[in-house]
Amino acid sequence: MTQTETGSVRVDSWLWAVRLFKSRSQATAACRAGHVRVNDDRVKPAATVRRGDRVVVRGGDRERVVVVEQLLVKRVSAPAAALAMVDHSPPPPPPVERGAVPYRPRGSGRPTKRDRREIERLRGY
């Protein structure tokens, strides 16, 4: 593993190294947009993280809460990345069942009168 000899690493570099983002530029953009917090403070991409810092990343459909265990500069394998952080994220929301949401197959054509009535009933008209 590529660890630093110093006691801190840039937050955008660390987020990329532990595979929370696919690219470092995405991690930088998330920091600039205010989606990354270190110890409950919004941070810029050049802010540093140290061991024991709590990092909260908002993105996609969920929020990731991790605690820094190892300081990494370069991207590592997924098992090594899992050892570099402790994940305290809430579980992801359960997937939506097919029958719970109104579903109409693509390319099924124009709805019939019966279909339109069902759609209106679902929408509350």
Image (tube, rainbow, N blue to C red):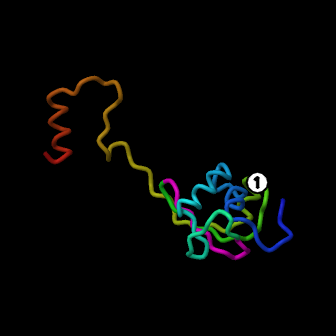
Toward which corner of the image does residue 53 lie, by quadrant? Answer: bottom right
Q: Quadrant of the N terminus?
A: bottom right
Instruction: Measuring from the top left, give residue 105's x and y in whole percent.
Output: 34, 30
Residue 88 visible in the displayed image: no
As drawn, 103 above or below 15: above
Magenta span: 49-60
Residue 23 seen in the figure:
yes
Name the residue nearer the viewer: 2 or 116.
2
User: In percent of the image, x 53 and y 62: which residue is there?
Assistant: 35
Picture residue at 15% right of the left edge, 31% below the top: 114
Residue 111 lies in quadrant:
top left
Q: Amino acid at mark 1?
A: Arg
Question: Quick one: quadrant of the C terminus?
Answer: top left
Q: How many numbered dots are placed on residues in this image?
A: 1
Q: Residue at x 73, y 57 (%)?
A: 17
Q: Nearer the viewer, residue 97 or 72?
A: 72
Q: Give residue 123's position: percent from left, percent from top.
A: 20, 45
For the residue labelled by badge 1, is the local secondary structure a helix, a strand or a loop?
loop
Q: Is residue 25 above or below residue 53?
A: above
Q: Is residue 64 above or below residue 60?
A: below
Location of residue 40 with respect to 124 vertically, above or below? below
Left or right of 111 in this view: 85: right
Q: Nearer the viewer, residue 58 or 82?
A: 58
**Left or right: 5 as drawn, with respect to 107:** right
The x, y position of residue 33, in whole percent, is 53, 59
The magenta stretch spans residue 56: yes
Q: Is residue 62 magenta?
A: no
Name the quadrant containing residue 104.
top left
Q: Which residue is mark 1?
A: 75
Q: Is residue 112 left or right of residue 13?
A: left
